[in-house]
Amino acid sequence: MKTALTEMLGIELPIIMAPMFLVTNTEMIVSAAECGIAGCIPALNFRTIEDLETGIKEIKSRTKKPFGVNLIVNKSNVLARKQLFKCLDLGVSFFITSLGSPEEVIKESRKHGVRVFCDVIEETYAKKVEALGADGVIAVNSGAGGHRGNLPASILVPALKATCKIPVISAGGVGNGAGILSMLALGADGLSIGSPFIATNEAGVTTEYKQACIDYGAEDIVVTTKLSGTPCTVINTPYVKKIGTEQNLVEGLLNKSKQLKKYAKMVTYYKGMKLLEKAAFSASYKTVWCAGSSIEFTKKVEPIATIVERYKNELNEARIQLTRTLES
């Protein structure tokens, strides 16, 4: 299969394994690359710049195929510039930027021939990053895990295709071959898929986190503002039901104050990320697991290679079925 994404990155299947905070690791990136898709890892999954360098060097020593790094480019990430230049020095294949202006990332990456894809949730921002020189946009729809968009893929993808001349990669709500085909039929040049790769052999999260992705489904995904102050999708476990998904009265009042909003959000973000970190790597009743609706298709823990091979087979079967339907 050839799309703009496979041609740009030199991959077999038009899929990026989405960067997942605290989930994606070097083992997952290598496995994804060797399977014919492109993995992307959050720079913030490495605690220090030295750890980031070690991780990238490990990946490059184990695969010659493309992989990317996700950069948070707003003021909350004080390491953003150091992460950018370290990744450029080490020769990553592409960046995915999130939560801020990608201007510097695009400018510096162009000097090195490194691709830049930018998370967007609507047309206005997509046009802005295209004007800055982005190579493509990640259309984060309402089915995405983590910080999702507001529009369903059926609206967002065609809207961005009509607005932008650069490739559009759909992110959210897909966990099988038929879903992949549906996004391509909408005009997407590729897909960013994350949650189905949580329950894999390569993921370093707890057995309990992986099992939750098997036991729960699409109807169990809820949106919470307790983690970062921004709507974020999590699995609706008994603990999440107990603590609720809305900020409490004090948090809400602080966020409405122009003078205190910035600091309130920083505190909420810090507390939320610590809660996610604890949940990802240690088992307890007080767990908050981030995931998207595509865990609906997770039935067991298996290798990334098995999932990718299944996607290839399912995609082929879906194409055959579609052809039969159209001919009948």
Image (cartoon, grey):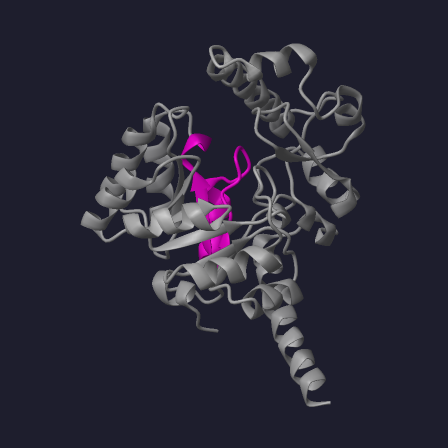
Q: Is residue 268 magenta?
A: no
User: Within the image, what quadrant is residue 5 found in?
Assistant: bottom left
Q: Is residue 135 depicted above or below 50 in this figure? A: below
Image point (62%, 77%), residue name? 319
Depth order, front residue of 272/142: 142
Depth order, front residue of 204/182: 182
Image point (71%, 42%), residue name? 213
List x then y, in percent, for residue 176: 66, 61
List x then y, in percent, for residue 220: 77, 40
Assign the C terminus to one quadrant of the image.
bottom right
Depth order, front residue of 76/215: 76
In the visual, does 145 lie left or right of 10?
Answer: right
In the visual, does 22 lie left or right of 61?
Answer: right
Q: What stretch is highlighted in magenta?
A: 16-45
Residue 266 seen anywhere in this rendered image of the structure: yes
User: Within the image, what quadrant is residue 316 found in?
Assistant: bottom right
For this orientation, the residue located farthest to the bottom is 327
Image point (61%, 52%), residue name? 303
Q: Does the magenta stretch include residue 17?
A: yes
Q: Is residue 252 depicted above or below 310 in this figure? A: above
In the visual, does 216 lie left or right of 45?
Answer: right
List x then y, in percent, for residue 230: 57, 29
